[in-house]
Image (cartoon, grey):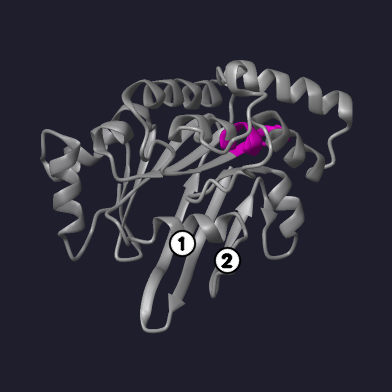
Amino acid sequence: MLELSDLRKTFGAVKAVDGVSFTARDGEITGLLGPNGAGKTTTLRMLYTLMKPETGHIRVDGTDITLDPDGARRQLGVLPDARGLYKRLTARENIEYFGRLHGLDEATLKTRTDHLIRELGIEDIAGRRTEGFSNGQRVKTAIARALVHDPRNVLLDEPTNGLDVMATRSLRRFMQQLREQGRCVLFSSHIMQEVAALCDRIVVIAKGRVVAEGSADELRAQTGEANLEDAFVKVIGSEEGLSL
């Protein structure tokens, strides 16, 4: 479970994150929905310890990331906005490298790597260098790398960005499998269809603040709109926001 309380982060005069608070629960997919520049990526970067919040607290399965950042990282699997694969390494070597960074023994590493390659359907590219991979191949390899240490909390920053229809469908199915395994899945997106199809709970961020949260049905009911896109537009256009 991920607990964020009153997070704030500024860059000069810009309030990128301005008092963000929400909880992402185990066995659920929680979506961070917002327009570009809303503060979604900055929030995720603070969550996975790439940035330090100026105020507020983050707990990962009860571990305070400020007091024990290494302990929090061990419980997180992260797909950042920059995929960051090592181009000269094969897909398998990228996965194994991160497993060793997490201290996995060789037997466990092989079992976990083989399992993820099979589950993500990348057997045919596992022995290829990642240079020249398609977007879908890069994302799947990066997800396997993020999950090799078997974390209970998975953070995905716009995971389907740039993917074709088939790769997107495959990734959505995999995210649903993570939820079925009881993991906490938190992902950011600005694609309404994706959020409506996947998320148990949606957190809407605009101008660095949480302006609404709830299920897709709750957001539609609260705004009186028939579809999520119209509800979203109404929410981010409101000065007061919503609390569900």
* Residue that mark 1 sits on: 42
Would you say residue 152 is visible in this rendering? no
Q: Residues within 10 Å of mark 1 (few under 14, many from 20)?
A: many
The percent coordinates of residue 217 (x first, y second) are 24, 32
Does residue 41 appear to the left or right of 239 in the view shown? Answer: right
Does residue 95 appear to the left or right of 240 in the view shown? Answer: right
Marks 2/1 in contact by CB < 8 Å: the verdict is yes
The percent coordinates of residue 12 (x first, y second) are 42, 83
Confirm whether the magenta stretch covers residue 150: yes
* Residue that mark 2 sits on: 51
Does residue 208 appear to the left or right of 112 in the view shown? Answer: left
Type of amino acid at the residue the image marks with label 1 = Thr
Q: Residue at x 50, y 54 (%)?
A: 44
Does residue 128 appear to the left or right of 244 in the view shown? Answer: right
Type of amino acid at the residue the image marks with label 2 = Met
Q: Camera-side residue: 180 or 82?
A: 82
Q: Is residue 172 above or below residue 208?
A: above
Q: Residue at x 73, y 34 (%)?
A: 93
Q: Which residues are magenta?
A: 142-153
Confirm whether the magenta stretch covers residue 56: no
Q: Which mark is residue 58?
A: none
Instruction: Locate the N terminus and report the quarter of the image it occupies.
Output: top right
The percent coordinates of residue 36 (x first, y second) are 30, 57
Disc 2 on helix, strand or loop?
loop
